[in-house]
Image (spheres, helix red, strand yellow):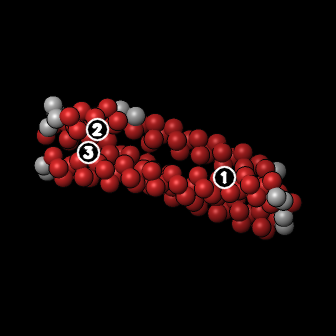
Amino acid sequence: MNQPDLVRLWSKAWNRIIFAQLAPTTLLITTVALLQFGLADAAVSVRWAAELILLASGILGALAEFTAADEAMGLAKELATVAPTDASTIRIAAAARYLPVVKFVTPAVFVAIFAFLSVALLG
């Protein structure tokens, strides 16, 4: 694969990482807001429905984020072999150093938030 194709794929992977965070983040923020407006006092079935929506969205978001970060890491490695001294490759390599955070830490933070919201919803 040539450099322009790899850079294009890197950009797509990066966009997937960003979009993978939007839905779960929005859902978590909305759930916190709804807790302030009485979701914690809703019927048990409604609270369980909210819990399962959070779980399904979280699993899908974490999987999308993990796979996009993994793909971006692979693309950055391949790009470094194709054009190691090109300016865009150097910038991509610098950004790629932080992809393990996206791959592991961010989903872990979402799991912690989910756990706290679970306690608030069901506890």
Taking the spot 40% from the left edge, 34% from the top edge, the residue there is 98
Residue placed most toward the observer, 123 or 17:
17
Does any portion of residue 27 appear in the rendered image? Answer: yes
Give the spatial CA distance, label 3 vs label 2. 9 Å
Q: What label sits on residue 43 in the rendered view?
A: none
Which residue carries the number 1 mark? 29
Number of marks? 3
Q: How would you rate the neighbour count of disc 1 (Cα within 10 Å): few for under 14, some for 14-19, many for 20 or more?
A: few
Q: Amino acid at mark 2?
A: Ile
The residue beneath circle 2 is 92
Point 51% across, 51% down: residue: 21
Please tell me whether mark 3 or mark 2 is closer to you in this view. 2
* Residue at the disc numbered 3: 75
Residue 65 located left or right of residue 11: right
Specify which label sits upstream in the sequence, 3 or 2: 3
Residue 117: % across, % down: 72, 50
Residue 108, picture quadrant: top right
In whole angstroms, how far apart are the C-alphas of marks 3 and 1?
32 Å
Q: Say which of marks 3 and 1 sits in front.
A: 1
For marks 2 and 1, give the CA distance: 31 Å
| Element on which disc 3 rests | helix
In primary-sequence order, the first of circles 2 and 1 is 1
User: Image check: 116 left or right of 18?
Assistant: right
